[in-house]
Amino acid sequence: MPNPKLPELALSDDEASVLRGWTRRRKTAQALALRARIVLRCAEGGSNSEIAAELGIQRATVAKWRSRFVVDRLDGLLDEARPGRPRTISDDQVEAVITATLESTPANATHWSTRS
């Protein structure tokens, strides 16, 4: 019987698929994978204490990610912007530099170096 105090957590097929993908991908950050496992387990039912005991984490952690998912869905599980100075280099600029160094060679050299 579900706990009446816990928020209802029902997953769509697409959300469940994305969450399972996050838990299985090798390149997924471990924090995000844990959050995905928490939400998948919450969707199966059970109290925060039971889920915390199964996953070896604190009950407050389960409560936090359950409530964030209920409010913001998948976006609630992603890392939020951190305080501090905003970036001055865009993703496009980073991509251009990487592409230039990987796909071209400098004049009179066989490869790029830190000096060139």
Image: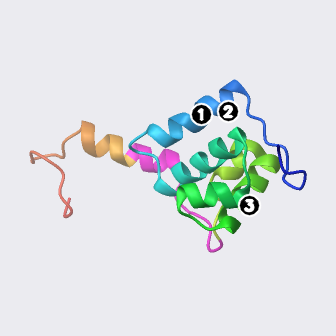
| Residue 78, image x, y percentages | 63, 52
Q: In this rendering, which labeled residue sits more in front, label 2 or label 3? A: 3
Q: Residue type at mark 3?
A: Ala
Q: Against 53, is 21 above or below?
A: above
Q: Is residue 60 magenta?
A: no
Q: Using residue 37 as the reference point, say whether residue 11 is left or right of it.
A: right
Q: Which residue is mark 3?
A: 63
Give the quadrant of the N terminus.
top right
> Which of these two is toward me, 95 or 12?
12
Q: CA distance from mark 3 to mark 1?
A: 21 Å
Residue at (37% x, 48% y) in the render: 97
Q: Quadrant of residue 87?
A: bottom right
Tell whether label 2 touches label 1 (CB within 8 Å).
yes
N-terminal label among 2 and 3: 2
Q: CA distance from mark 1 to mark 2?
A: 5 Å
Secondary structure type for disc 2: helix
Q: Which residue is mark 1?
A: 18
Residue stretch in magenta: 83-96
Residue 15 has which mark?
Answer: 2
Tell whether label 1 touches label 3 (CB within 8 Å).
no
Residue at (50% x, 42% y) in the render: 23
Q: In this rendering, which labeled residue sits more in front, label 3 or label 1? A: 3
Secondary structure type for disc 1: helix
Q: Using residue 79 as the reference point, say whether residue 5 is left or right of it.
A: right
Q: CA distance from mark 2 to mark 3?
A: 19 Å
Q: Residue type at mark 1?
A: Val
Q: Using residue 26 as the reference point, say whether residue 59 is left or right of it.
A: right
Give the quadrant of the C terminus.
bottom left
> Which of these two is toward me, 101 or 106?
101
N-terminal label among 3 and 1: 1
Residue at (15% x, 46% y) in the render: 107
